[in-house]
Image: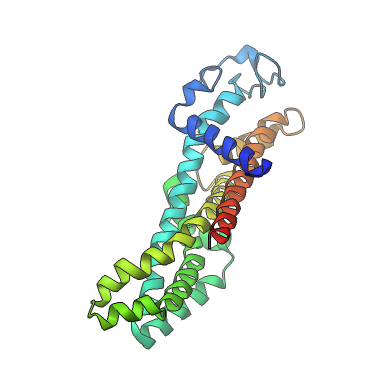
Amino acid sequence: MPRAGTVLAVAFVAFLAVATVAPSLVWTQDPNRIAAADAFESPSLAHWFGTDESGRDVYSRVIAGTASSLLIGVSATLIGLALGLVLGVLASFGGRVLDFGVGRVIEVLFAFPGLLLALLVIVVAGPGPVTATIAVGLSTAPGYARIIRGQLVGIRSSHYVEAARVLGHSPGRILARHLLPNALVPLFVLATLGVGQAIVWAAALSYLGLGAQPPAAEWGAMLAAGRTYLPTAPWLTVFPGLMIVGTTIATTMLGRALTRRGREGR
């Protein structure tokens, strides 16, 4: 029987999926409707998360920002996985020289904290949501590359790979049919954990003014816009922050549940 925490995580992720695909089904009013007379209203039945400085409904804006926040997190994770896959394959199948070179590149990238590496990329390429997504993806790539390399090296010496070599299968066919499928399954589980991390980093960049810019309905941008009014209207930052924390916890719990299920199935 699934644990209660896992059930709640699945339910929350399902809610996020609905908010992403059809936000009008779950928001209470137009997130961009400006009503100056309703500015800075505290949470109530009329406005569940209160209103901002322009009288816009914060709950509806949080829901509207789900799609952009999740898109950044998922896209950054996919970029990190793709680059990590390339580096991992080159390191494990490119010979000793290439393995040594890729290993040194990964070590250099690991020398920088992930968020600092993302900041360096933005300094070079310029701020913006697309740049922030790419920067976060690049900063997560070294971790994925090291994991993929370790998986491929371990699988490469397995009996079924040796049997495929004896049967005369080409290295490309062995990689496509035997190595990558077995290496990517655990990596997919790890990616569910990485999505939450990518969302946090992207929100941090937006909070610093290097990602999505206010008045965009993106969780990090909403945090940045609400920090000025934190003493008088804390709900402007509390609720977007809770969505970031909730999404991170839900995706992490979901990833751990998949990991436990994989171990139990062995």
Total numbered labels placed on residues in the image: 0
Is residue 130 found left or right of 261 in the rendered image?
A: left
Q: 104 or 4, which lies in front?
A: 4
Q: Position of residue 230 (x, y in %)?
A: 73, 34
Q: Residue furthest bottom?
A: 96
Image quarter of residue 10: top right
Is residue 4 found left or right of 205 in the rendered image?
A: right
In this rendering, does residue 202 appear at all? Answer: yes
Is residue 223 found left or right of 100 in the rendered image?
A: right
Q: Position of residue 149 (x, y in %)?
A: 44, 74
Image quarter of residue 168: bottom left
x 47%, y 64%: residue: 141
x 72%, y 21%: residue: 42
Q: Height in image: 223 above or below 110?
A: above
Q: Height in image: 53 above or below 46?
A: below
Q: 235 or 140, which lies in front?
A: 140
In this rendering, does residue 124 appear at all? Answer: no
Q: Position of residue 117 (x, y in %)?
A: 53, 63
Q: How is the image coloured?
A: rainbow
Q: Height in image: 66 above or below 190?
A: above
Quadrant where the N terminus is found in the figure: top right
x 56%, y 62%: residue: 114
Q: Position of residue 109 (x, y in %)?
A: 51, 71
Q: 18 or 221, which lies in front?
A: 18
x 43%, y 31%: residue: 21
Q: Height in image: 117 above or below 242?
A: below
Is residue 168 found left or right of 217 in the rendered image?
A: left
